């Protein structure tokens, strides 16, 4: 997900996206703990997407 795509969304959509990403991140962490995850690069991608969403949310909060 690109930052430009996130900036096009409204605040409610960003909060929903963040919630979905946090749930996905938790699921991936549990899969690692139980040794069921084969593609560990998904974890890094999810972490970075969470950071992107939070960055856009913080930019909007600072602009107000």
Image: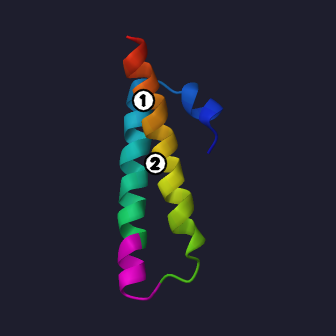
Q: Quadrant of the N terminus?
A: top right
Residue 58 lies within the magenta run: no
Q: Earlier in the sequence, mark 2 or mark 1?
A: 2
Looking at the rendering, the stretch of residues picked out in magenta corresponds to 29-36
Residue picked out by circle 1: 57
Residue picked out by circle 2: 50
Residue ID at (56%, 67%):
42
SS label for mark 1: helix
SS label for mark 2: helix
Residue ID at (38%, 69%):
27
Task: Return the residue found at the far bottom.
Answer: 35
Disc 2 and disc 1 in contact, CB within 8 angstroms:
no
- Expressed as whole percent of the image width and height from the top left, the position of residue 48 reads 53, 52
The correct choice, above or below, for 24 with respect to 48 in the image is below
Residue ID at (36%, 83%):
33
Q: Tag on residue 19? A: none
- Expressed as whole percent of the image width and height from the top left, the position of residue 45 reads 57, 59
- Expressed as whole percent of the image width and height from the top left, the position of residue 12 reads 38, 29
Q: Quadrant of the C terminus?
A: top left
């Amino acid at each position: 997900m690109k930052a430009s795509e996130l900036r096009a969304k409204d605040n409610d959509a960003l909060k929903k996206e963040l919630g979905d990403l946090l749930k996905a991140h938790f699921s991936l962490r549990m899969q690692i703990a139980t040794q069921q995850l084969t593609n560990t690069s998904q974890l890094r991608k999810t972490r970075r997407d969470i950071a992107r969403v939070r960055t856009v949310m913080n930019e909007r909060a600072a602009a107000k």
